[in-house]
Amino acid sequence: MTSLLPKKKLLPTVGLSDSPLKYVAMLASVLMLLLAGAVAVVEASRLSGIENSGNSFHYFLRHIAAVALAIIFLLITLHIDYRKWRKLAGGLIFVSFSALIAVEILGYVANGSRRWIDLGPFNFQPSELLKLSTVIGLASFLAQRRSQIASAKKLVVPVMVGLGAVGFVIAKLQSDLGTAILLAVIVAGMLFVSGVPIRYLLFPLSGVVAVGAMFIASVPYRRGRMVGLLNPSAYCSDETYQVCQAMATLANGGLTGTGFGSGQAKWGWVPAAHTDFVFAVIGEEVGFLGGVVIIGLLGVLSLLGFRTAQEAPDFFGSLLAAGITIWFTGQTFINLGGVLGLIPVTGIPLPFISYGGSALLATVSAAGILLNIARQSR
């Protein structure tokens, strides 16, 4: 099996294949998503702000600070030649994995999980940095071993061993199965588009699925979410309460929404309204049509991200662009799937929209790298 990236066109022409137009469309999508996220957070976080600090704008102000810093990161990464990240791949992997381990020593517990390190003015979640370093590191590794793509022993085995180690730390020690699943999706996607024969992926991915099922079965609330997925209305008072409330909120929004500021979700109707379930707030206040706009912007970014992967100047750039796009697309699907009751809730934020400084900085920095590749694409 040859690589799907450099030669074959996986996507139809969308009228934006010229590099300048593609670059502008991607940049505009990122900026509009950041603006939409800021508006959504100011609406969704009022009750949480009052309860935790006495200030209804507490989380909004923190989010705006994160957005401002993220834009600085965006300007930096989109002006750094993407090839330079290849030299930093090993260091980024080491730093992010070390920080992941450090959480077990220095981290604090929130909502039953130890995932964050308190750095004073802000909290740092190492697993978000790990997503970015995994994409860069794997792109570098696969580009370096391009001649060995068809070798399971020299390519797939070491990658899966690394994924297993990282996945264990995240899923077991930090109780963050959602991020572990997302990393598996990213790794599997990058291996596939690089040209690794599908037969070499079936066995290890079957193992990943089996381990994931074991993690789900071993924790009561995860089992409850899986069972509740089959019949959410019967379990609304238990593990699927958030999903039931989110779906009712979206239904309340209808086609055009209740109007900005008029929704009820932000007043405690939907738990985690400004983080994992921010799309429910958006859907209630701006309706189905507004929700389609948000999904459309994320879709444009994904579509043009994959076109960038096809048109990148070299194999490393193709893999890097594909990995970032798989990350954004997979995370969007996991978040929206949870909100809409299509898959169990995993605690994965909606890219560029949800409150959360570490996630925002990581995704926007990755978007800057993707934009740099797009600027240099043919």
Image (cartoon, rainbow, N blue to C red):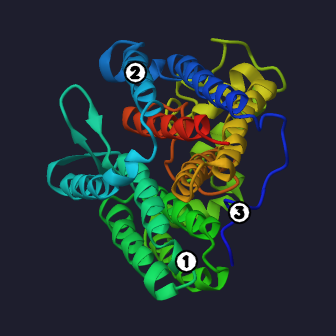
Query: 234 or 77, which lies in front?
Result: 77
- Along the polypeptide, which appears first: circle 3 or circle 2? 2
Check if mark 3's residue and mark 1's residue have beta carbons within 8 Å: no
Label 3 secondary element: helix
What residue is pinned by disc 1?
Answer: 149
Write down the residue under mark 2: 59
294 sits left or right of 327 in the view: right
Residue at 78% x, 34% y: name it: 16
- Which residue is painted at 58% across and 46% down in the image? 328
Tell me how far mark 3 sits from mark 1, CA to CA: 40 Å
Question: Which residue appears at 51% of the width and 80% of the height?
Answer: 148
Q: Nearer the viewer, residue 237 or 378?
A: 378
Quadrant for the C terminus in the image: top right
Q: Residues within 10 Å of mark 3 (few under 14, many from 20)?
A: some
Q: Looking at the figure, which quarter contains the N terminus?
A: bottom right
x and y percentages locating residue 355 in the rendered image: 46, 30
The quadrant where residue 377 appears? top right
Nearest the viewer among 369 and 133 is: 369
- Is the residue marked by circle 2 packed among few (<14), some (14-19), or many (20+) residues within 10 Å? many
- For the residue marked with disc 1, what is the amino acid? Ile
Decide if residue 176 is on the left or right side of residue 107.
right
**150 to 238, vertically: above or below:** below
- In space, the residues marked 2 and 1 are separated at their CA atoms by 46 Å
Left/right of residue 168 with respect to residue 323 in the rendered view: left
Residue placed under numbered mark 3 in the picture: 230
Query: Could you tell me which secondary element the residue under label 2 belongs to?
Result: helix
